[in-house]
Amino acid sequence: MIGKRYTWIVCFCSLCCFLGFNTWSFADTQHISFAYLEAGLKDLNDADRHVAVQLLAKELIRDSGNEIKVFPLNSMAEMLDMIEVGKVNYVIINSYLYLTGRQKLQPFLTDEIWGIQRAQEAKENYVLVVAQDFNYQNLQSLLGKSISIHKDYLLVNFYLNYLVKKEAKLPINKFFKRIKDTRTDSQAVLDVFFKTSDSCLVPQYIVDLVAELNPSVLKGIRIVHYSGAKFIPALVLRLKNNSVDTSNMIRNNLLTLSDNARGQEIMNLFSIKSIKPINANALQDMIKLYDEYQSMAVEK
Amino acid sequence: MLIKPKSSIFIRVFFLFGFLVLAITLFFAYMAIPMQKDAFNQIMLTQAETVSRSIVQASSDALISRDYGFIVEHNVEVLKNNISIFYVLVSPNAGETILVNQKSWRLLDKVDDELLSLERPDIIYKILSYEGFDNVYHFVYPINFSGVQWGWLHIGFSTEQYNKLIDNMYKQIIYIVGLSLLIIMAVGYFFARWISRPVTEISQLATQVAGGDLTVRSNIKRQDEIGVLSESFNRMIDSLQQSKQQLQNYNQELEQEVDHRTQELAELNKGLDAKIHEEVAKSKQQEALLIHQSRSAAMGEMIGAIAHQWRQPLNALSLVQQNMQLRYEMDKLDADFMNISMEKSNRLIQKMSSTIDDFRNFFKPNKHVDIFYIKYVIRATCELLDAQLKNHNINLTINCPENINIVGLEGEFSQVILNLINNAKDVLVERSVADPMITITVIPASGNGIDVTIKDNAGGVPESIFDKIYDPYFTTKEEGRGTGIGLYMSKIIIENNMGGSLHAFNDSEGANFVIHLKNTPPIKNKSIV
């Protein structure tokens, strides 16, 4: 039998071991940081957006024991600053912002890119919609008319600028009499249906969505231009400062995100269908358009 | 003997307590249900108003500028975020009427009449069926901008939540009632036990006391009325015990006293028989004496009556003798006068002799009960007093049918008649009544009996002595002139020996003595002899 004194000693040592083990365990815990630019995620309000990104981040590192940090950022410059100091592991970014800042981002990026999909197809096709009875011949028919557009949808906005610039050699604010910023893409279509606007530029799946709610809408509108399936709305980018284990873990979780109920819920928060891995070539259509637009701007 | 209660106080208190609590609970539930329903209604109304107001506010610019795209988009989003809203209908005074539901939206040519009737200046709601939904809480909100009516907002809310709340409320009430019942049973059991146990205990103790056990005591110590009852009960038992002890002591003393008295009584009894015999003998002697005295008195009276009866014939006889002597002295006494005088004398002597026979027969006691004719006896008795009555000018009338007979003792009856007539005669003479009369009336009475009434006109028996007239030795006559046993003996004879009754009453003229006789044999063992 151990005497009373020895019992106390044994307990004390056990406690020290326990604390030491936990301290060692804590030392092994990693922080994984996600940063996102708020621009381009305006569908959710600020509070919901941050919560949604946190939920996504947590889901991506689930069961790892790692801690996450989520940084909402206002500008590309801010993001680049954080990336440069290694504070960020993953970036969620609107594709347009990626296009604008890819030169500076490229050195920090790996070739692991994930594309966010909102429609049935991986790439979105933007369509120009006018009222059924509108006398549309070409883009010039819309000169001095009104257009509805969801401005937060940066890529759509970019494409409109590109289109107008290419066809009419004018900036959109001079081409159109009125540019109405709608709260949602669907509303832009409805504006055309209700003849509140003469036209709108929206992803095609939006037209399909609107028609689903009210098939008679299709009788009031018609699509006069297709961009082609070129656009990926947003990207998840892995930076180079990730460990292999972390990268594998997050990759696996991203792959299985749409397979579980929680993942589905998170994607519903963002109104997205899935997050799928893409290769760099998938971005070439957008990059080409962007470069072409830039060159047009320089030519002016 | 155990006294069992017909119903337990425990059960009564238990059920009363339970009933009261349950009644109160149900009452409050009954009161609470409508209040709660109103509250839920109010909640729904408030929610509906809030939703309507927020929709209108959020889409006010769009409503004014008729930005239908925004209106549709906004309401689609509202419905997406509120599954309890079935539909939203925007009904402007002018412009497109838009109906948005959970799955789609469309433009309406016109609003249904039922919904149109709800478009009023104030908010209104109605439960109706619309768009394939039943029991829809259809809320109509007027849209006004700067006092100008723009149109109406119709919103169809699901009543599922409301119904759930109502169901929950009912469930909660049932739960509360059920819980109350359980609590009632538990609390009621202990409460009823708390009330009834001491009462039951005291009741059982009381039963034991009633059975005779005075050693029991109550151990209940409480500060309330039951404690007082317990204490009082114990004191009562103490008092009972003391009383019992006292009673036992008294009993003992009483027994001793009784024993003593019993002894005395026993001793008394020993001499009592002898005394009784002595007294009976005395009584018989007295009775015999009374009879003897009565007889003597009667005899005395009779002798007086005889003397009276003989006075006249003796006078007449003396007259005959004087006439004879006068005729002899006048030398006119011849054989004819002698014969006539002798005949007269013989008749007078014969009459005097028959008077003695009559009196002698009168005093001969009857040994046997026999039938006799009343009129004959009365007449014979009256003849004995005829002279005296005539002497005092007392008119005697006898009203008696010839054929009335009676079974009895003839002699005793005669004595009674004689006594009554004598008394009447004496009082008529004493009071010097003018035109004195004695009337004897005999009439049949009920039950085959007869009534013999001897009536006088002397003014009646004074009320002060009415109840004494039958007492022995009571008389109103001067000393030496009456013995006071005549009426006593008459009553004895009539009532004891002849089985009848004798009573008297006064009328306006005088006293009436009524002898009522039944026509049955008298009691034989009460012979006066």
Image: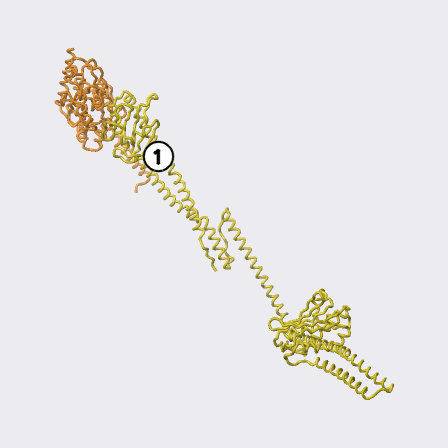
Indicate the quadrant where residue B397 lies: bottom right
Relative to B320, residue A163 above or below: above
Q: State which chain disc 1 sits on.
A: B
Amino acid at circle 1 = Phe
Residue at mark 1: B40
Q: In the shown orientation, is residue B379 left or right of residue B120?
A: right
Quick one: quadrant of the C terminus of chain B? bottom right
Q: Position of residue B203 (x, y in %)?
A: 48, 54
Shown colour of chain A: orange
Relative to A195, residue B85 above or below: below
Asked which colour scheme the image uses, the reply is by chain
In the orientation shown, which residue stands out farthest toward the top?
A: A300
Depth order, front residue of A57/B290: B290
- Badge 1 marks a residue whose secondary structure is helix
Q: In the shown orientation, is residue A34 left or right of residue B264?
A: left
Q: Position of residue B448 (x, y in %)?
A: 60, 73
Shown colour of chain B: yellow
Indicate the quadrant where residue B384 lies: bottom right
Depth order, front residue of A70/A13: A70
Q: From where the camera sits, is residue A49 visible?
A: no
Q: In the shown orientation, is residue B421 left or right of residue A196?
A: right
Indicate the quadrant where residue B399 lies: bottom right
Q: Position of residue B137 (x, y in %)?
A: 31, 33
Q: Position of residue B221 (x, y in %)?
A: 49, 49
Residue appearing at x 35%, y 38% in the figure? B169
Residue appearing at x 20%, y 24% in the figure? A90
Q: From where the camera sits, is residue B148 visible?
A: yes
